[in-house]
Amino acid sequence: MRESRSDRLFKAFTIFIVLLITASCLFPFLYIVSVSFSNKTAVMRSEVFLWPVDIDFSAYKSVFGNRSLMTSMWFTIGLTVVHTVICVVMTVLCAYPLSKPDLKMKAPLLLFILFTMYFSGGMIPGYLNIKELGLLDSFWVLILPGCLSTYNMILMKSFFQAMPREIEESAYVDGANDAVVLVKIILPLSKAMLATIALFYAVGRWNGFMDALLYINDGDMYTIQLRLRQLIQSSQVSTLIEDIPEMKEDVIAETVKAACLVFSMIPVMVIYPWLQKYFVKGVMIGSVKG
Amino acid sequence: MNNLSFSNARKGHGARHSSFTYLRNHWILYAMLLLPVAYYILFHYRPLPGLVIAFKNYNMFKGIWESPWVGFKYFKQILQFETFWVAVRNTMVLNVLGLVLGFPAPIILALFLNEIRNKTFKKVVQTIIYLPHFISWVIVGGMMYQLFASSGLINTVVKALGGSAVPFLSSNGWWIFTYFIVGIWKNIGWNTIIYLSAMTGIDQEIYEAARVDGCSRFRMMVSITIPCIMETIVIMLILAIGGLASIGFEQPYVMQNSVVMDVADVISTYVYRVGLEQAKFSIGTAVGLAQSVINFILVLSANAISKRISGKGIW
């Protein structure tokens, strides 16, 4: 069918807007990657825009040579792996029984759990609780307090509920118990959903920094985000008082800062293709179930 | 029907017995729930009694229970702190402006994305616009400094064009502007998902019929697409209104600096600064409690309104 002139105009306009927004979403990434690979003086003379100028790997050399940054990186990778495994196990343990339509005491159990979504003690009682439990400055404080997300649990529960009941019925007839049914029948059919949930937890752990900020003082247990925050903040102070010439000596080179940002994005970028696919799926399930 | 009444009758007859059989056959289900329940008790319910320190003069050495009661002293005190009211005002300003400016943005983008017929192009666009959602606030804060600082890229361009540097991060008004730009940048793409999925549910025959009648593309967007996703829009709006009293910690925290605290200090960062950094635990708890209660009321009323309008609540 022939398009009218106004339709063509409208189409061009929508494409223009979409391209504009897409470009502005992408641009900051391109810019910091370019800065991180550029020569320091080129950056200071503001010559870098979209492409690296005078390609120079020295920023990355100082990032990979920085012991505390590397320690934080490895620590956070280990932390994320342990956290994700524990979280997925906890989520399944909680969601599977609650997905059973005939579970006795289901309503009070759900109320007990859902209440926590809408009312919490807040920052200070939470902090005092962690302190009383003796978890401050420990590895576990970055894992246990967030090892089950009610939102993810409900996603998982809806997923289990949507499975046809006949699948497990024959196993029950054969005398299998709930644990066997879960491990042998349900979980193998839930791989995509488990992957979605695992990614939710992994990204949350990788990107989160508030808990580390509140509960961790020991530099050896700084997560990568906290380390990065410290680094940015120390240079932020100096940009605010940049009129004082002697302070300029201490300023961390922009290229190094950019390299740190890029460095800490690497793990997320590596798994981004999977991330995107599964996350979108998870959000859709969440929105359907409300 | 027959089946149903039969099972009901059986249930009524030996409810006790069947409960017992159920437990014996399915005790594993309850065993599975032990760890999750322990988690909720330990990390969600155990902090709740700590709320009483809002009404006590908390002394770290005496602990929560031995500290003396002071009644509403701290609540009265807070009301007289100017900094508290500044934080409340800033939270409201940032949230209300965020709702007015940030809420329609993903809807408009989703409407435009929906007009794109080329699947590959659409997919590439979606991959790119979802990306900022996966980047931590710390990194976003770092990128923001590279772009918006007085010596950052944007000001370099402004100066090259003959303008004078814009104080994006150090003047109150411009800081609020930057806050929204950064917030929209991070979330606009991601928030389109829910509207796009609502749009895929629209019956294509409606568009077909409109096309036969000679309806323009723009007209179809206004008269078909928007009404069809209205319910989703209303629900999202109600959810957003329910969240007006609470504000995330991470975005304001990574974006604020000492120069703009007058507009950048919000309730969450205020509680952190006063309650933890200055170790005024009781005051921090009191502020948090007041906010929790207001929040709870807002969410409940938002849900009630949603039930009224669309016939169904959020939960």
Image (cartoon, grey):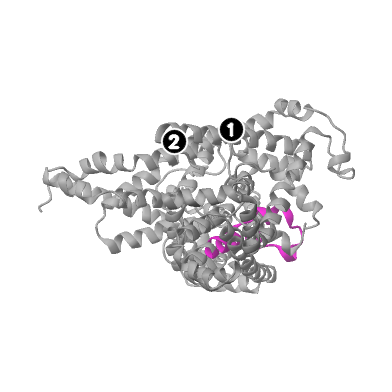
Dot 1: chain letter: B
Please identify the dominant SS of the magenta region.
helix
The x, y position of residue B45, in whole percent, is 71, 47
| x then y, percent, for residue B40 | 68, 52
Closer to the chain start, of discs 1 and 2, is 2
The residue wearing badge 1 is B297
Q: Callout 2: residue from which chain? A: B
Residue at 52% over, 52% down = B144
Q: Is residue B203 visible?
A: yes
Please rate how many residues cluster around mark 1, counting C-alpha atoms within 10 Å: few if below 14, some from 14 to 19, many from 20: some
Q: Looking at this view, is B43 or A234 the one in front?
A: B43
Of B39 and A283, which appears nearest the observer? B39
- Residue type indicated by callout 1: Ile
Q: Which residue does the numbered mark 2 point to in the structure image?
A: B100
Checking the image for residue B193, the label placed there is none
**Magenta stretch in the rendered image:** A198-227
Q: Nearer the viewer, residue A229 or B100?
A: B100
Between A207 and B54, the one nearer to me in the picture: B54
Is the residue under label 2 in contact with that under label 1 (CB below 8 Å)?
A: no
Q: Which residue is depicted at the point 25% across and 49% down?
A: B203
On the picture, is B3 further left or further right than A107? left
Q: Is A201 within the magenta?
A: yes
Image-quadrant location for residue A87: bottom right
- Mark 2, secondary structure of its residue: helix
Q: Is mark 1 on a helix, strand or loop?
A: helix
Disc 2 residue type (three-letter) = Val
Q: In the drawing, does residue B257 fall left or right of residue B305?
A: right
Q: In this view, does B147 lie to the left or right of A73?
A: left
Q: Relative to B53, does residue A272 appear above or below in the rendering?
A: below
Q: State yes or no: residue A144 in magenta.
A: no
Disc 2 residue crowd, few under 14, some 14–19, many 20+, Cα 10 Å: few
